[in-house]
Image: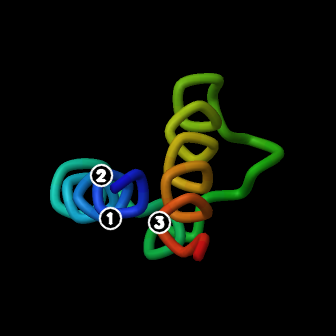
Amino acid sequence: MKTKIFKLLAKLNKAILPSYTKKQLDLSKASKLQLAIIGWRVYVTKNALHN
């Protein structure tokens, strides 16, 4: 059940949140908001892939 929720969140993240990889964002120059978005996406992806 938990994995299904995170998979849904991952799909929403992909549709709504920006992809900083495609923009080639330098992490040392990222703002705190950008770092928070990156952290959230990593957290959701990690939990969506967890078996």
Foreground: 21 or 9? 9
Q: Which three-letter amino acid code belongs to the residue tagged 1?
A: Lys
The reply to whether the C-beta atoms of the residues labelled 3 and 2 are less than 8 Å apart is no
Residue 21 position in % (x across, y down):
53, 71
> How far is disc 3 from disc 2 in space, using C-alphas?
8 Å
Residue 43 position in % (x across, y down):
60, 49
Q: Check disc 2 and report its element: helix, strand or loop.
A: helix
Foreground: 22 or 40? 40
Foreground: 17 or 28? 17
Q: How is the image coloured?
A: rainbow
- Toward the top, the furthest residue is 32
Q: Within the image, what quadrant is residue 6 found in?
A: bottom left
Q: Please give the name of the residue rendered at 23% of the width and 64% of the height, measured from the top-left corner.
A: 11
Residue bearing the label numbered 1 = 7
> How far is disc 1 from disc 2 in space, using C-alphas?
5 Å
- How many neighbours does mark 2 have within 10 angstroms: few (below 14), some (14-19), or many (20 or more)? few
Residue bearing the label numbered 3 = 48
Q: Which three-letter amino acid code belongs to the residue tagged 2?
A: Ile
Q: Please give the name of the residue rendered at 64% of the width and 23% of the height, measured from the top-left corner.
A: 32
Q: Please give the name of the residue rendered at 41% of the width and 62% of the height, measured from the top-left corner.
A: 3
Q: Check disc 3 and report its element: helix, strand or loop.
A: helix
Residue bearing the label numbered 2 = 5
